[in-house]
Amino acid sequence: MKQLREILGYILGGVLFVGLMPTVMWLASGMPPIVHIGALRASITGLLMIGGLTLSIWTIVYMKRRGKGNPMDAFGHEVAPRTRHLMTGGPYRLSRNPMLTGTLTYLAGFIVWFRTWQAVLVWAIFFAIMFIQVLTEEHRLRKDFGEEYDAYCKRTRRF
């Protein structure tokens, strides 16, 4: 049951962040054509999307292998098993929220691709919602890991 819940969590995350959010951005942008965007824009889009997805996937793999779980709560509800210790290595050396940073970078690729204010607005709303989630998660991490988490916060940026 635990493994099924974990798999469903990853599937749900993939559908939401990799599929649904770009679709919402595209729909909000008036469904612009998704081809013929020019070499420069296509290159920037590709770099942002591949870079963002790479960071997010690296984080998921690192969490699973090193942390034996997932530190994410969705607004106070455990989505997948939590890690047993504070993650500070791997992608967590770069950011306290590398998976979200990767997702935001991936979605920024769609802003470049669609080039509309509506895509920027959807990204900004998503960021605002996720920022509230990050603050909630930080509270829980501070409670779970205390001084170790405070020291980590001092040396590693949120994003």
Image (cartoon, rainbow, N blue to C red):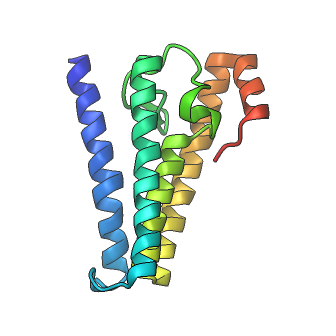
Q: Quadrant of the N terminus?
A: top left
Measured as percent of width and height from the top left, residue 106 is found at 44, 58
Measured as percent of width and height from the top left, residue 67 is found at 47, 19
Q: From the viewer's perspective, tell me whether residue 63 is left or right of residue 7.
A: right
Q: Quadrant of residue 7?
A: top left
Measured as percent of width and height from the top left, residue 53 is found at 40, 50
How many marks on residues? Answer: 0
Residue shown at 61% from the left, 18% from the top: 144
Pick the residue in front: 91 or 144: 91
Residue lying at the far front of the rendered structure? 39
Q: From the viewer's perspective, tell me whether residue 142 is left or right of residue 73.
A: right
Q: Quadrant of residue 35?
A: bottom left
Q: State whether residue 11 is above or below residue 68.
A: below
Q: State whether residue 144 is above or below residue 77.
A: above
Residue lying at the far top of the rendered structure? 84
Residue shown at 51% from the left, 74% from the top: 120
Measured as percent of width and height from the top left, residue 71 is found at 49, 27
Q: Quadrant of residue 110?
A: bottom left
Residue shown at 57% from the left, 58% from the top: 128
Q: State whether residue 159 is above or below residue 20.
A: above
